[in-house]
Amino acid sequence: MRTLWNPDQASTWDAAHTQAGASLQQDWAYGATMKMLGVGVQRVVVEQDGTPVALAQFILRCWGGFAAVVLCSRGPVWLTDLDAADKRRCYRAIKQSLPLRGLKLHVVTPGEQYGSSLGLSPLRRVVTGASTVMLDLQLPEGELRANLEGNWRNQLQAAENAELKVVKMASNPGAYRWLLDAELKQRVSRGLDGLPPQFFDVYLHARKNPAATTLGLRVDLGKTPAAGMVFLIHGSVATYQVGWSNDEGRKTRANNLLLWRALQELKARGIAWLDLGGINTQRSAGLARFKMGTGGQVQTLAGTYLL
């Protein structure tokens, strides 16, 4: 295996990332955003016999030039089918060639599901895997609707019958600032984690085409927003990033309508998969039920490993 660190061709990376249907955390613009926010980033392309077989983007936390934690989240991105032995060779080549001095702790949270041929020793697993919900937008719309859990579908029908007004937000920061502020307050009150609000402005700038990078929708009751959602689009996948509703929005089931309209819009844009993000049935049971009620595939990821 041959490693090529910090390639300068974003377009080549993006094409491979899109073809693989990879995660937001392995998107070139995600790394570019982190760099602009002052976070260290290292990218690597792994070749086998001259052919790229893997991409990996690492986020760094450094302590001077003496030590660093190097994290590859939802990666590497495998560009071809590799068996466990070849994946082990990839990991070994990455670890041995990382262009960083001092002590290094290499951490990976693969994007693969638990039980896959990871090429990683189970003895090196330090955290169990999180779960997420993936919606296959390649299915016909009628099938997507039929896959909705019965109560979820009834709530959607109630929101449709209420003739709620759904507004598509512009992609400039001012259009969705209110939503980020409201979601941040909600996050703090519930003790939840998330990306810093400034991430979104920088990410849109990094992708250079905000209209194709984000989808923001809101429901207005009178002149006041009652609910809103923002989705980030990276290649052939979109990720549900921000969601908020007030008491009136929850009563009218505005979020059911917003998510349904969003998947219709994303499907029309040719997006193949919608990643609804992590589910936690203990800390956020209601949100977990909402996401699972869409009929998407619950995927439990492999966990966190030390290399």
Image (spheres, rainbow, N blue to C red):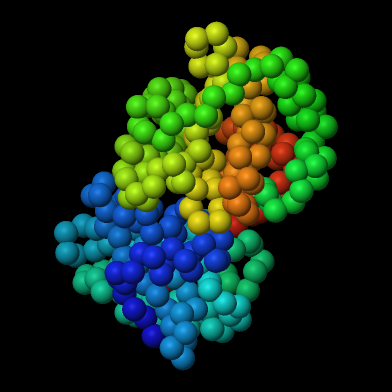
From this view, report whether residue 96 is shown above or below residue 204: below
Residue 124 lies, in percent from the top left, at 50, 68
**Farthest residue in the top direction?**
222
Along the horizontal axis of the image, is 62 left or right of 164? left
From this view, report whether residue 16 is shown above or below residue 61: below
Give the total of numbered labels. 0
Give the residue drawn at x 53%, y 79%: 87
From this view, report whether residue 300 is shown above or below residue 169: below
Give the residue drawn at x 50%, y 38%: 215
Q: Quadrant of the C terminus?
A: bottom left
Examine the rendering and report whether any part of residue 152 can be seen. Answer: yes
Front residue of this view, candidates 42 and 162: 162
Along the horizontal axis of the image, is 151 left or right of 89? right
From this view, report whether residue 187 is shown above or below residue 237: above
Give the residue drawn at x 78%, y 38%: 145
Q: Quadrant of residue 95?
A: bottom left
Examine the rendering and report whether any part of residue 110 can be seen. Answer: no
Q: Quadrant of the N terminus?
A: bottom left
Residue 195 lies, in percent from the top left, at 40, 40
Along the horizontal axis of the image, is 266 left or right of 70? right
**Farthest residue in the left direction?**
64
Along the horizontal axis of the image, is 236 left or right of 32? right
Give the residue drawn at x 38%, y 59%: 28
Residue 200 lies, in percent from the top left, at 37, 39
Front residue of this view, candidates 288 and 151: 151
Residue 79 lies, in percent from the top left, at 53, 73
Q: Quadrant of residue 291?
A: top right
Q: Quadrant of residue 184?
A: top left
